[in-house]
Structures are given as structure tokens and as C-alpha cells.
Image: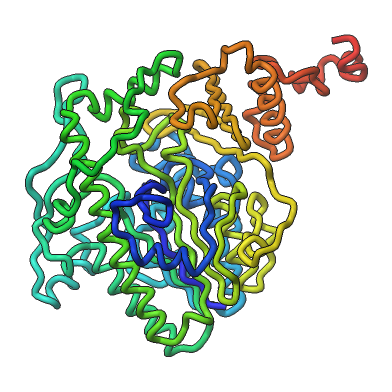
Amino acid sequence: MNILFLMTDQHRVDTLGCYGNPHVDTPNLDRLAASGTRFDRFYTPTAICTPARASLLTGQAPFRHRLLANYERNVGYLEDLREDAFTFPAALAERDYQLGLIGKWHGGVRRNAASYGFDGPDLPGWHNPVDHPDYLAYLAERDLPPYSISQPIRGTTPNGNPGNLLAARLHQPVEATFEHYLATRAIEYLDRYARDGRPFFLATHFFGPHLPYLVPDEYFDRYDPDLVELPASIAETFDGKPPVQRNYSAHWTFDTIPIEVTRKLVAVYWGYVSLIDEQIGRILTRLDELGLTEETSVFFTADHGEFTGAHRLHDKGPAMYEDIYRIPGIVRIPGAAPQVRHEFVTLTDCTATILELAGADVASAVDSRSLVPLVRGEHPRWRTELVAEFHGHHFPYPQRMIRDERYKLVVNPESVNELYDLFDDPHELNNRYAHTELLPVRQRLMRRLYDLLRERGDNFYHWMTPMYDIGTADHDPTLSSFEPAREATWPADG
């Protein structure tokens, strides 16, 4: 079974027609969804690039693989996976797979995609590397103009400096964009792998629609800002919320940007999504032309979402809202009927799915569960809640989250915890952690999260043992060997 893995970066679910957006043109991804399985509740294990991508590579939760931050903002965490870490490309290579990765790597500093066996140009970093020699050669060969932007959109930081670049007008034709370049290279590798005849895994990782949104005129102006319905959470007050969220709002300069500019930013983001959809369409068309569609499983997903003004925020950060944790997830396996699934699944589950499709052992992907039975229309017993984690971006900031059908609990050790009723408050504006009527819900979720973290071996649970209502402890939380008599009778004398 060949595998084509298409991935975007910082991609909101609600920008796709197949997920309900009535305005944004995404015909190619919509067609993929209509011919495959669209997962309605597909989540990232952590809403930050490098750790999420490392979870895909290993099939392990971030606390386990320990690659916890993007290297550009790293404050002391590991910057590469351990040398002995399991990765799925190694397992596929053992089965004589051709391995290609075109696009964003962002998986470490000393080890690049080639270190894990992938073919393709080495494209590190968090955003389009428009000075990369291979991209410059692509432009030169086609007599295309270089990267150039104007009309930058940015706010003002709390100390009066210009804020991060959020968007700008790109002065290049579509054929010169980095997105078109990536799709062209992916098609070249498809052709090469088809000629070889051995099975292949080919990933195309677009750097967008991650901000800054740098797109040509026809995408910068494609959507009328008046079409943009601003998210209800733009009314965020941060009352009863962890103060870090208000700080991040200031960092991303939301209140220094007029609301009509915010609408324009969302419209440009939509344009970026359409640009990428068109390039994905080129890749899928070539797959059809090569006669490989019935021999190739296709994935489409993202590493995490994007705020684009929701909760008066941009980018991502230490706020575990649906905007950045719920992501698109589409899987098409030849012979499987089209459908929509509502189980809680994660980006990490793609690892075991890839391994199963390749006929490899899935056991080493310890935090991953294959989606193949779901895609094939089966109804196995499945998880009824979802756990996610965060470890910081600009500074260490540990969080853990659990959500079930209706409620979400977020544990913030240095701050106030959060509890949201996603039925009554789908935009997560009202933190109900302190509401007495939801005390049984809070206790139930806290204990369930505690048990799941202990089962996994996630040491975050140690803080929870003495600090939160997790019921009667069944072990000595000091892990002490100095009181053997006490430990022998724990917890009866405690």
C-alpha cells in the first residue's frame, strides 16, 4: 500500500468547505473528504509545531518523546529526539518503502528529515525558507520573480515596538509561490517513485497557512472581509481565566489592531487556505494520472490550529481551546466507503495507521491507535475522552487537558484551572471550574485525568496528588523510603 501524507501547519478546521465553511473554496480537500473518511473530532496531542510533529514521527505523546518545544523559542528542553527513539520511517524502510518528505521539517536542529531516511530538499524552520537554494533554483529555471512583499499588517507590542508580522501582499505569481514549488517537487517525486515500482510513503508538509499570511493579490483579495463572521470568542474578557492568556493577547497585539483589519486578516487567511487547496489538487490529480489512486492511501491533516482573532489571540500558545487543538483529519483508504466519524482521534493515531497500512508492527507506537478499523467502517471499542498536553513556547508553561463528550477540564498548576461546558458554551468563554453545580463533573474529570496520566507514566500527576480533589490516594506521594512502616500501611494511617 502506497501512502500519500498531506499536512498543513496551523490550520483551522472551520476554513474548509467539508467542515462547514460556506465561503472558502477548498474543492480538492472537499473531494478527498467526500471519497474518504472525515473525522469530526480529530485533535493534536499538543498545539505547537515541533512536539506535535515528533508525536507523528514516533507515535508517542510529547511527555514521552520529550521534544517539547520549537527550537526557535526553546528555553532548555531537548532539541532533537533521542538517538534510540522509535520512528515510523525506520519501520517502513525495513519493508523496502521509498520514503519522501517534501516541505516543512521542523523536527530538530541536528537531525533533519534525511536523518530519518526521507528523500527531499532539506527545508528546516517554521516558515517558508524563501532563501533556500533549491527554491531559488526553481525560480531561476522558470524565470520567475523572487519573493517580495508590501503592505505588512502588524500591531504594536506593550513596549511600543512593532508587533509580529501577521500578513502582507506577496508580489509573485502563483507559479512562484513556495506552495506551488512544494507541490511541483512532490509531483516530481511521485513520478520518480512510480517509475521505481516499490511502495512509497510520500509526505508533503506545507508551511502554511501558518502566519504571516503572505499570498499573491488574487488570494490576498479573494475574499471580501464583509463575508467574515468574527468568532463569538472575540468577546473574550479573560475574567476568571489564567492571566497568561491576557498577556498572550497583548503579545499578539490584538487590541492595537482595528476590528476591520482583523476581518481582513481572516479573509487573507482564507485566501491562503485556497492557495494550498489548489496545490494539493495538483498532487492528487497527478496521483490519478499515474494510475496510483487505487493503490494509495491518502491522509490530510495539520499539526495544530490557529486563533485568527478567536479569544482575542493570534497564533497559538498556553490556552487549550478548541480553536488550536481540534484539527482537520481526512483519511482515504482504497476500498473503504466514504463516511464521517465522530470518535475522539488524534494526530498521533496516524502513526499506527501508517504502520498497519505498511504491514509493519504497531507496538512501538505506544500512544497511537490505528484508524484503519474506523476508516473501514467498523465499530471497535474506542476512547471516550481525549487527553492533550502543553509544555510552553516562549517560556515553560505545563498544562494538561481532558475532554469528554460535553466537558473540558484544563489543569494549570501555577494558575487557575479551567472547566468548560462545550454544549452550553461551545466558544469556551465561561470558566466554570469554581461553579458548585459542576463540582461532580470537576471531580470526575480530575480523577479520570489523574488515572490516565498515571497509567501513561506522565509525571504531571505528582502535582495533582496533593493539590487537587483526586479522592483517596492509593500510594505514598512522597515516593519516600525513609518511612517503611508508614508505607507498609498506606493509606490506612495517613
Nearest the camera: 482 or 453?
Answer: 453
Residue 21 % position (x, y)? 36, 50
At x 52%, y 68%, the residue is: 332
Residue 477 % position (x, y)? 75, 20
Color theme of the render: rainbow
The C terminus: image quadrant: top right
The N terminus: image quadrant: bottom right
**In the rendered view, would you say 182 is above or below 470?**
below
Count how many numbered circles sit on residues in the image.
Answer: 0
Nearest the camera: 170 or 18?
Answer: 18
At x 41%, y 67%, the residue is: 31
**In the rendered view, would you say 2 is above or below 406?**
below
Is residue 16 toward the left or the right of residue 325 in the image?
left
Is residue 278 toward the left or the right of residue 11 in the image?
left
At x 39%, y 51%, the residue is: 109
Figure quadrant of residue 349: bottom right
At x 65%, y 39%, the residue is: 385
Is residue 102 toward the left or the right of residue 444 in the image?
left
Figure quadrant of residue 192: bottom left
**In the rendered view, would you say 189 is above or below 166?**
below
Residue 92 % position (x, y)? 58, 71
Residue 75 % position (x, y)? 40, 33
